[in-house]
Amino acid sequence: MLRELADMRVKITALVALYKAVNHDAVEKLRRDALKSEARQKVYGLCDGTKTVADIAQIVEPGKPVETSKKAVSYHPTELEGRGMLAHRDVGRNRYYFRVLE
């Protein structure tokens, strides 16, 4: 089963690369439109698959209580995921976002 999942990952990666190549202008417009906000640019840049939303919030809004900054920041990854720019993986109670459009 793990081998099948690995094969699927390779195929999906190839499809994404093909999509980006064929739709380069549309992808660039999507990225420009989605990343107009400086805060969203920071959040997007920090979504590397190694940080939780709380980690990102602490970096983007240092000095603020985690719960306050987490509420303000968590909107951005959700929006970017909805636009197809991010994906996530859940590990326990933590959610890690990573970029799918580079």
Image: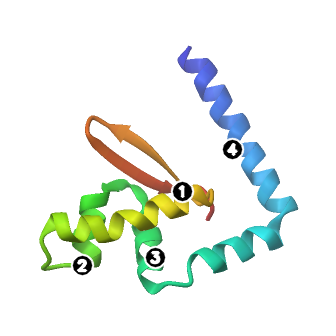
Label located before the other in sequence (2 or 1): 2
Image position of 49 (left or right of 8): left
* Number of dots carrying numbers: 4
Among the 4 quarters of the image, the one containing residue 70: bottom left
Three-letter amino acid code of the residue under disc 4: Thr
| Residue 101 location (% of width, % of height) | 63, 61
Q: CA distance from mark 3 to mark 2?
A: 12 Å
Residue at 16% of width from left, 66% of height from top? 66
Q: Say few, some or many: other residues with alpha carbon within 10 Å of mark 4 (under 14 / 14 to 19 / 20 or more).
A: few
Three-letter amino acid code of the residue under disc 1: Glu
Residue at 35% of width from left, 63% of height from top? 74
Label located before the other in sequence (4 or 1): 4
Numbered label attached to residue 40: 3
Residue at 59% of width from left, 60% of height from top? 85
Mark 4 sits on what residue?
13
Q: CA distance from mark 4 to mark 1?
A: 17 Å
Q: CA distance from mark 2 to mark 1?
A: 21 Å
In the rendered image, the vertical position of residue 76 relative to residue 1, given as above or below: below
